[in-house]
Image (cartoon, rainbow, N blue to C red):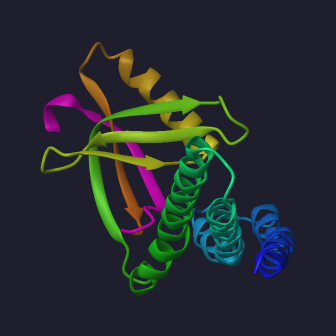
Amino acid sequence: MIYRLQKLTMTTGVLALVFILPMTFSAVIGSSDGRNGIVENYCSIPFWICISVFVICTAVTLLYLSLREKHSGWQQKLAFPVIAAVLAGIAVFVLYVQVVNPLRDIPYLNSPHTVSLADVSFYYSNISDSPTIEISGTDADGREETFSISRKEFKEGETLLHQAAKSGGAQAVTADITYLPYSETVLDMDMKITDAAKR
C-alpha cells in the first residue's frame, strides 16, 4: 500500500513538472489583448490536477502512516490526521478554483459578462514572486467588485487616476470590464476619465 502511494505521488510530481511547460509556453507567446488569460487557464488545468493529486496522495500517505504506527504518542496520532485533512482541503480548493471554475466558464467564452465600475482604485503588492495587481470599484448596484489585472493595465489606470486627481474632484476614473463569471478572468477593460457628476 505505502509503495503504491509513493509511486503515485512520484508520478504525479513528475507529471506536474511536465505540464508546467504548456503554462510557460502560453505565458511566453501571450498577447496583450486580454484573451491570453483564457489560454493560460486551460493550459494550466493538467498541471493543477497533478498538483492536487500529488497533495492528496501525500495526505493519504500521512494518514496511512498514522494508522499503522502503533507505538506513537497521542500527539503524533492526532497531528498526522490533522495535517492530512488540511492538505486534502487545500487540494480540493485548488481543484475548484483552478480546474472547476475555468471549465464552468466554457459556455461564456462567446458571451462573457460585462460590468461598469465607478470609484475605481488600484492595488499592487509585490510581496511574493507573483505580484498581486487588482482593480476595484463599485458596480451599478453599489456592490464592490475586484478583478486581477496586468501590470500594464495597472500603470494605465494609475496614470488616469493622477490625471483625474488634478481636477480637484471634478473628474473620476471609471472602467468597463468584460470578464468570465466563474474564474473572473478579465478579457477586456476600457478605462476612462469621466465627470464626477455623471457617475
Residue at the front extreme? 71
Quarter of the image for the N terminus: give it. bottom right
Location of residue 160 with respect to 94 vertically, above or below: above
Compared across the picture, whether 177 is left or right of 30 comes to left
- Which quadrant holds residue 43? bottom right
- Magenta span covers which residues? 181-199
Kindly identify the residue that appears in the image at 57 percent across and 39 percent down: 132
Q: Position of residue 141 (x, y in %)?
A: 12, 50
Q: Observer-nearest residue: 168 or 22? A: 22
**Residue 191 part of the magenta-drawn span:** yes
**Residue 147 part of the magenta-drawn span:** no
Kindly identify the residue that appears in the image at 43 percent across and 49 percent down: 147
Compared across the picture, whether 169 is left or right of 19 comes to left
Compared across the picture, whether 53 is left or right of 11 comes to left
Q: Observer-nearest residue: 175 or 197? A: 175
Q: Position of residue 45 (x, y in %)?
A: 64, 75
Kindly identify the residue that appears in the image at 29 percent across and 12 percent down: 168
Quarter of the image for the C terminus: give it. top left
Q: How many marks?
A: 0
Q: Is residue 109 visible?
A: no
Location of residue 54 with respect to 155 vertically, above or below: below
Q: Position of residue 39 (x, y in %)?
A: 65, 74
Q: Is residue 22 visible?
A: yes
Location of residue 96 with respect to 151 vertically, above or below: below
Q: Position of residue 180 (x, y in %)?
A: 41, 69
